[in-house]
Image: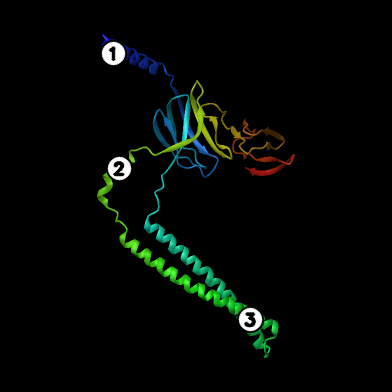
Amino acid sequence: MFNRICLLFTLIFASAYAENKEKEVRFKANFKVLSFNPDIQDLGYLEEKELRFVNINQDIISSDFLYFGKPEIEFVKIITPKPPPSELELSVETRQNAEKKLEQISDQYNKLNLQLRKINESIGNQERQPNSSELLIINEINNSMQLLAEKISKAETELANAHGNYLRNLEKAPKIETNKKKDNLKKENIPPPYEPLAKFTIPVSGGNYILIFNKTPNGVTISPLNDAPGVFPFGSYQFINLTGTTVELRFGSKVIPLNPNGRTVFKPETANGEYLEGEFWTKVDDEFKLGYKFR
């Protein structure tokens, strides 16, 4: 009897879960991405539990992505785990540091040597003996050069040891084997770790959007542009202000103010074949200054 009751509860729970899954609302949207910054890399988004990769550029709008899932598209930054440096990599870094150290000490020595040579040449050209102040300077330079010569000797020894250690690690370094391709393919199927970056809430009606990513001190924001066919009149322009301050768009006598994160659509009154000329003016210290001209 008890087993029958447990089975009944299990069936009821499974049926209710399946019914809730069927009732879950799925949102559909087409979107493209564009970066306002040049340094947003390793981007992806989640569709259900599947991670999809996105190529994002600063100057080129991406191809279309079709999303079907929860009301919010979760964009994530893909984390590429960095393995600890190998002994060979550490020995390369040690050798490079030793080279820089020797170069810096040698540079100091050469500068003092040049200074000493100029003093001696000046005294020799005058065919006289150095005076007391010149002797003091010459002695100070000689003492400094002697100390630097000792440091150069130690630095050369350090560099030789570092180079020898590098050669030993190079000899021990494992060779890349081509028969490990299958193992690499298996690893590629494992989704990489990621962390939340930004979200975009899809309107109930769905639609087509261009998602502009903007990196700010408080994180990454997304400014969506409606990209549905027929949204803009033929020959019109859409402007979005991501500068963080008020901007004025000036087209001749026509002035269009645009607040931070504001947007506007403008259709110029230019004939076919004519250029559109305009200016962007940015508000700085309670006055507008010319920032950019375009034609």
Q: Which residue is mark 1?
A: 7
Residue type, label 3: Ile
Say which element carries label 3: helix
Where, quadrant-wise, is the C terminus in this rendering?
top right
| Residue at left offset 54%, top offset 74% | 148
Label 1 vs 2, first from the N-terminus: 1
- Given this view, does label 2 or label 3 mark the residue nearer the observer? 3
| Residue 70 occupies quadrant | top left
Whole-number angstrom distance, CA of label 2 to CA of label 3: 69 Å
| Residue at left offset 55%, top offset 78% | 146
Residue type, label 1: Leu
Mark 3 residue crowding within 10 angstroms, few (<14) / some (14–19) / many (20+) = some
Q: Who is closer to the viewer here, 50 or 157?
A: 157
Say which element carries label 2: helix
Q: Who is closer to the viewer here, 285 or 229?
A: 285
Q: Which residue is mark 3?
A: 138
| Image coords of residue 90 (percent x, y) | 41, 58
Residue type, label 2: Leu
Question: In the current view of this chain or complex, which residue is farthest to the front?
Answer: 2
Is residue 280 visible in the rendered structure shown here?
yes
**Is 68 left, or right, of 266 in this rendering?**
left
Whole-number angstrom distance, CA of label 3 to CA of label 1: 100 Å
- Given this view, does label 1 or label 2 mark the residue nearer the observer? 1
Mark 1 residue crowding within 10 angstroms, few (<14) / some (14–19) / many (20+) = few
| Residue 172 occupies quadrant | bottom left
| Residue at left offset 28%, top offset 13% | 7
Scheme by which the image is coloured:
rainbow
Question: In the current view of this chain or complex, which residue is farthest to the left?
Answer: 179
Q: Who is closer to the viewer here, 45 or 100?
A: 100
Q: Which residue is mark 2?
A: 185
